[in-house]
Image: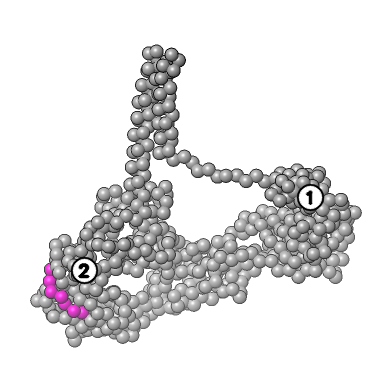
């Protein structure tokens, strides 16, 4: 009696503990399920829009801003069991600036916030683990309304109008007292900032990529350029408005940049967007030819000792500098199943090097370049010129090559070549009837930046076996017998196991050498799927197989197929499996609580049940 009570109390305690742990797990899990955006405005005319997207999504989603009252707006993450990256982008309305901006992770301020990146076209990314909750806090105000705590300009002031025009090029960025004017970019910029008309103001201006300042005039006064060519800061005298006139020119005297990144998040960390992302492949700068004809290799470029040519990696982010006119050799390596079908660097022309697969030469222009390789999904290719074979498919190709695609050329063998191999093939065939002699030539194909030209490397001896399925002509289908394959390679003849599907007319085999082949037929009583040396397999009535291992349900009795079983190559019938997910820790705690509760009731009531 006492022992039962002790067990009942112990199980009751464990039930309460399990319920507590399960509930706590749900609370922790819920904290990581969302991002929160809170938007406020200091005055009624301040407007702005916030956008977000998760991970590598292409499209931005606008935050539903029904009010600017600091109400938390929840944004559910795609999968709360995985780490994610959330991207935010802020677009200020006309004459609106950001009065306050802050990003918190689990209540603590995140120090990586950069408003220049946040308000750029690519926005800013924040990594969020499964246990983190990210919160964007934002307040808008009009440029002339003032207000304490501004991090983008003076706390108060009058509205001062600004216009800027550029000839010979474009302005890359324009800010006064830390506030960006208009979009900051273009040949005609107009906007305003809040400031004191009786005080000096600080102008920061940058030329667009590939351009240098020839002259800068502010309200008719020339600004000394000094040694600066493309980025300048200076003070301007007090005025009611500012009219800035900029003349630009291209310059080959400085070094120009090439930048690239393997992922969008890496690009965004360095202030760039999709236009410098390398996807489904890799890039490597392997050499450069300088103006005096000197050729420097990759190690010398990475050493940083050459004034006009250098490369470096900042983690996964690639960066290079070259003087205009330098001939830069770049190697693009697509992943298997992808091809480089567009080879240009926002204007820089690439020329393929015929003797080196995947290699191009770039004549470095007088402009900074974003290296964005357009590796496009591409399929392996089969070319057939045979009277017995209509086509073929390839399997396990991803383990044969690591880059580009495979191409298999199939043709009939005749003439002198046939005379050289015919005797050896017949000796291997024995009583079998050779239906066709075939040459099979395999190539690795890597495109030269377009779909019309490619590097083709012939492959004769492979490190792994390629699965080849030949689609034979109609006269070779539905035959009562067995097909197999004989291969001749470097004078050696070998019979290869093969699978014949009479109904579909396919012969499948695996091989690691490519040269001459023969398709051999042996007549028999069964027309099902066959394997040389193992007898006739896969053909049966009512779903059963004869001389093989295949089973079916409600079989057709033809070619080893069944209505629901479909046997192939003498294998056992396939059984569908259902993938079950792992039980979450939260579910386990609740299951334990249920079991311990049932146990407590059982031991507590057992005596009364007996009575």
Q: Which residue is mark 1?
A: 557
Q: Residues within 10 Å of mark 1 (few under 14, many from 20)?
A: many
Q: Which residue is mark 2?
A: 46
In the image, is 325 to the left or to the right of 173? right
Q: Quadrant of the C terminus?
A: top left
Residue 29: x and y in percent read 36, 44
Residue 46: x and y in percent read 21, 68
- 170 lies above or below 477: below
> In what element is the residue under mark 1?
loop
Depth check: give the residue in front, 455 or 94.
94
The way the protein has been coloured in the rendering is: one colour
Q: How many marks on residues?
A: 2
Depth check: give the residue in front, 328 or 557.
557
Q: Residue at x 76, y 51 (%)?
A: 556
Classified by dominant secondary structure, the portion drawn in magenta counts as: strand
Residue 476: x and y in percent read 81, 61
The segment highlighted magenta reads 156-162
Name, please, the residue furthest toward the front: 611
Q: Quadrant of residue 238?
A: bottom left
In the image, is 468 to the left or to the right of 601? right
Mark 2 vs mark 1, CA separation in Å: 77 Å
Depth check: give the residue in front, 301 or 453.
453
The stretch drawn in magenta includes residue 158 = yes
């Amino acid at each position: 009696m006492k022992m039962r009570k002790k067990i009942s109390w112990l199980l009751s305690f464990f039930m309460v503990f399990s319920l507590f742990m399960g509930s706590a797990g749900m609370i922790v899990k819920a904290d990581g399920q969302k991002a929160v955006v809170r938007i406020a405005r200091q005055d009624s005319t301040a407007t702005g829009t916030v956008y977000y997207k998760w991970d590598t999504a292409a499209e931005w989603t606008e935050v539903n801003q029904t009010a600017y009252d600091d109400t938390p707006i929840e944004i559910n993450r795609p999968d709360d069991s995985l780490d994610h990256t959330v991207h935010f982008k802020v677009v200020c309305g006309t004459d609106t600036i950001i009065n306050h901006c802050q990003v918190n992770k689990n209540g603590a301020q995140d120090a990586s916030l950069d408003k220049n990146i946040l308000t750029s076209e690519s926005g800013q990314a924040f990594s969020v683990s499964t246990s983190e909750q990210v919160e964007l806090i934002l307040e808008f105000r009009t440029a002339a309304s003032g207000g304490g705590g501004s991090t983008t300009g003076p706390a108060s002031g009058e509205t001062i109008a600004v216009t800027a025009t550029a000839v010979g090029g474009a302005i890359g960025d324009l800010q006064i007292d830390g506030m960006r004017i208009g979009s900051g970019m273009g040949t005609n910029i107009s906007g305003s900032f809040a400031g004191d008309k009786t005080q000096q103001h600080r102008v920061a201006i940058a030329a667009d990529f590939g351009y240098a300042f020839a002259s800068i005039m502010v309200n008719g006064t020339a600004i000394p350029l000094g040694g600066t060519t493309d980025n300048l800061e200076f003070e301007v005298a007090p005025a009611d408005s500012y009219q800035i006139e900029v003349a630009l020119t291209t310059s080959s005297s400085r070094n120009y940049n090439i930048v690239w990144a393997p992922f969008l998040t890496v690009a965004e960390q360095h202030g760039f967007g999709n236009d410098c992302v390398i996807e489904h492949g890799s890039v490597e700068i392997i050499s450069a030819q300088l103006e005096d004809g000197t050729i420097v290799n990759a190690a010398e470029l990475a050493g940083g000792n050459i004034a006009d040519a250098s490369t470096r990696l900042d983690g996964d982010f690639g960066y290079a500098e070259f003087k205009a006119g330098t001939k830069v050799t770049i190697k693009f390596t697509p992943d298997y199943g992808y091809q480089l079908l567009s080879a240009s660097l926002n204007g820089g022309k690439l020329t393929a090097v015929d003797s080196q697969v995947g290699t191009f030469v770039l004549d470095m222009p007088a402009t900074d370049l974003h290296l964005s390789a357009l590796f496009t999904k591409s399929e392996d290719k089969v070319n057939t010129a045979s009277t017995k074979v209509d086509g073929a498919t390839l399997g396990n190709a991803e383990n044969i090559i690591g880059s580009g695609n495979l191409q298999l050329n199939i043709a009939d063998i005749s003439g002198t070549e046939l005379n050289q191999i015919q005797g050896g093939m017949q000796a291997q065939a024995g009583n079998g009837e050779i239906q066709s002699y075939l040459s099979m030539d395999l190539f690795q194909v890597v495109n030269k930046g377009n779909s019309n030209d490619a590097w083709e490397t012939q492959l004769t001896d492979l490190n792994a076996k390629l699965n080849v399925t030949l689609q034979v002509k109609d006269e070779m289908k539905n035959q009562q017998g067995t097909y197999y394959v004989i291969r001749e390679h470097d004078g050696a003849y070998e019979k290869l196991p093969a699978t014949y599907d009479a109904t579909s007319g396919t012969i499948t085999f695996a091989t690691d050498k490519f040269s001459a082949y023969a398709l051999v037929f042996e007549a028999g009583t069964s027309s099902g799927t066959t394997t040389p040396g193992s007898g006739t397999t896969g053909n049966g009535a009512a779903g059963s197989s004869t001389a093989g291992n295949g089973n079916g349900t409600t079989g057709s009795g033809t070619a080893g197929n069944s209505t629901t079983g479909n046997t192939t190559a003498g294998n056992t019938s396939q059984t569908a499996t259902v993938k079950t997910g792992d039980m979450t820790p939260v579910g386990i705690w609740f299951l334990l609580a249920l079991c311990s509760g049932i146990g407590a009731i059982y031991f507590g009531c057992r005596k009364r049940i007996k009575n």
